[in-house]
Image (tube, grey):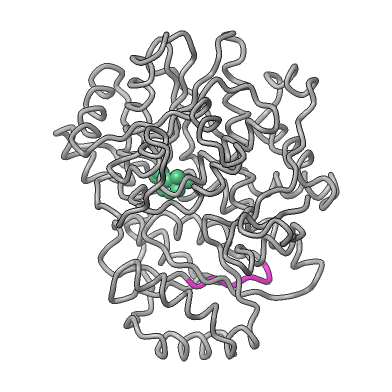
Amino acid sequence: MIFYSTKTASLKASLEEAVFRSLPPDNGLYMPESIPKVSQEFLDTIENKSFKEIAVEITNTLLGDDISKEDIEKLIHSSYDFDAPILKITPDDYVLELFHGPSMAFKDFGARFMAALMSHFLVKSKKEIQILVATSGDTGGAVAQGFFKVPGISVTILYPSGKVSDIQEKQLTTLGHNITALEVDGTFDDCQKLVKEAFLDPELTEKFNLASANSINIARLIPQSFYFFAAYAQLKKLGKPIVFSVPSGNFGNLSAGLLAYRMGLPVERFIASTNLNNSVPRYLKEGSFEAHASIETISNAMDVGNPSNFVRLVRFFGDDWNLVKEKVSGYFFNDEETQESMREVFSNSHYLLCPHTAIAYRGLEEYRKNSDGNFTGVFLSTAHPAKFIDLVEETLGKPVEIPERLRLLLSIEKKSIKLNPVYSDFKSLLFSKLGQ
Ligand SMILES: *Cc1c(COP(=O)(O)O)cnc(C)c1O
């Protein structure tokens, strides 16, 4: 597969280049030059296939020119020891649970695949790389778990001290081995700035093979299309058109749904469901895109005022607002509405939603009210509710059980290196850590 930059169509890259660079040199985003379709036979028999079989087929369709079928099978089998089950919540609405991976959020699907793909290329080239990543919470856990003990790769994660949840912090700081957590006395933006500066510093980039694991990496986007196909496989027998509601922040997840659609997945409509960081729902309504500063909400993994994947989202439709609007609807909700939906679904269906998932549920209901309602609705559940235990308990007014895995995690001692948000300190730390 050949990729081009959304800013300069003539700027091309191979898969390997796109994966290790993450961003093209002109700061656009990598997009596939052409999107191959899955075969009709695959769609006709998809209901008999497992998640892994579907993932192998999609990867082979997209990347079959770059990686052998045998290596693709290995890559998928080593990445996914978890599944994406569907559960019925109301007569016509289903939840797609994407939190059964090691960090209990959907970012595991992307991080695991990216780690396996990088490792595939590194084994061939015998190179060693250093990943630097800044996290506001969920990305760090997924990246830490995804790259844990992957040969040839060491990972440095920067997180803002005191600004991630206990569980999120433990997910970053308890693994050890090739994973180092830097606890920065500052904000997420400070962390991000240190990482960006490192990538621009020739003294570092000449000595080390630095790579990024951020959410715009094409190796995170591709695997997120698998579960849209897997959801279709489980619901096809109902015979109704399918509508997906995607709780969105940076819009990687929704872009992956559009990739699946462009590959031939039958989808009636996508709902872009957001919190008050609503630049995309407003674009869908008004036709113009305006980024804004991030607004803090209880669904904090979606507090993104300037979503980086917006460019990809519209590119799937040739940047034509009228075409985007035909396929994607947008709704946004405030914190009270989010909590109201958490309570409603718990009292009607005895099902716990994390705040992000609650927004997806509500977006689907809103669309149902504004349409003929004759469809099977799927809302994506992007995190396990126990990751946000304090908020969930406060909203429902009752204690909630924590899964054994998370309870064990909380009892392990954290190991982090404290860091002031000063570039020269960060740089000397990297030299002493990586230089050995
Ligand atoms: C990252 C994240 C989102 C937002 O996903 P995007 O791909 O950035 O739109 C939603 N929910 C949770 C729990 C997340 O961690």
Which residue is the extreme one toward the left? 397
Residue 96 image position (x, y, % from top left) = 48, 29
- Taking depth in this image into account, of 384 and 261 the one nearest to the observer is 261
Q: Which residues are magenta?
A: 151-156
Whether residue 375 can be seen here:
yes
Percent from the top left, x then y, of residue 405? 41, 47
Question: What secondary structure predominates along the stretch shown in magenta?
Answer: strand
Q: Does residue 104 appear in the picture of this structure?
A: no
33 or 158: which is nearer to us? 33
Residue 136: where, in percent of width, then height? 36, 60
Q: Residue 154 magenta-drawn?
A: yes
Q: Residue at x 75, y 43 (%)?
A: 34
Is residue 54 rendered to the left or right of residue 200? right
Q: Residue at x 72, y 49 (%)?
A: 75
The vertical placement of 257 against 102, above or below, is above
Residue that appears at 62% across and 54% down: 6
